[in-house]
Amino acid sequence: MSVKPCSTSPTGPPSKRLYTGWITVAGAALSFALSSGLMHAFTVFFIAFLDEFGWTRADASIAYALSLVRSMVSYLGGCVLVWRLRG
């Protein structure tokens, strides 16, 4: 029984399948668009939040600021995780 050496060059024409990296890029772009849209839509509903929950303007602004802080902390946590996994 003979063993053929492994070839490093492609043996046929390039595949027409979608590269999976582009699916990841599309998912990330969609996620970014939705999350930034929701974040900036807060001002549209600001008065409704005040009326519905009985909050003061300061309370609603603190809630928004805390959501921004949470976003920054989760981003930095992801950066640290990637750095730790690579090192």
Image (cartoon, rainbow, N blue to C red):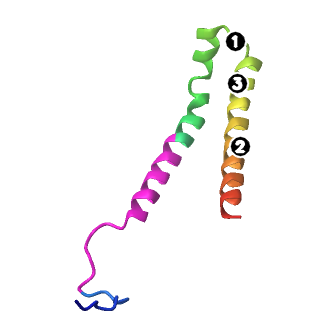
From the image, tell me which residue sits under label 2.
72
Q: Secondary structure at mark 2?
A: helix
Q: Residues within 10 Å of mark 2 (few under 14, many from 20)?
A: few
The stretch of residues the image draws in magenta is: 12-34
- The residue lying toward the viewer, choosing from 64 and 78, is 78
Residue 52 point in image, percent of width and height: 58, 9
Query: Residue sitting at 56 percent across and 27 percent down?
Result: 44
Is 58 situated above or below 34?
above
Q: Earlier in the sequence, mark 1 or mark 3?
A: 1
User: How far is mark 3 from mark 2, CA to CA?
Assistant: 15 Å
Q: Amino acid at mark 2?
A: Met
Look at the numbered discs 3 and 2 and tell me whether their residues touch, using CB distance below 8 Å.
no
Looking at the image, is mark 3 or mark 2 earlier in the sequence?
Answer: 3
Residue 29 falls inside the magenta stretch:
yes
The single residue placed furthest to the front in the displayed view is: 1
Q: Which residue is mark 3?
A: 63
Most foreground residue, 28 or 39: 28
Q: Is residue 14 above or below residue 81?
A: below
Query: Which one is earlier in the sequence, the residue at label 1 or at label 2?
Result: 1
For residue 21, what is the image quadrant? Answer: bottom left
Q: Are marks 1 and 2 in contact (CB under 8 Å)?
A: no
Per the image, the residue denoted by label 1 is 55
On screen, residue 52 versus residue 71, left or right, reads: left
**Circle nearer the viewer, 3 or 2:** 2
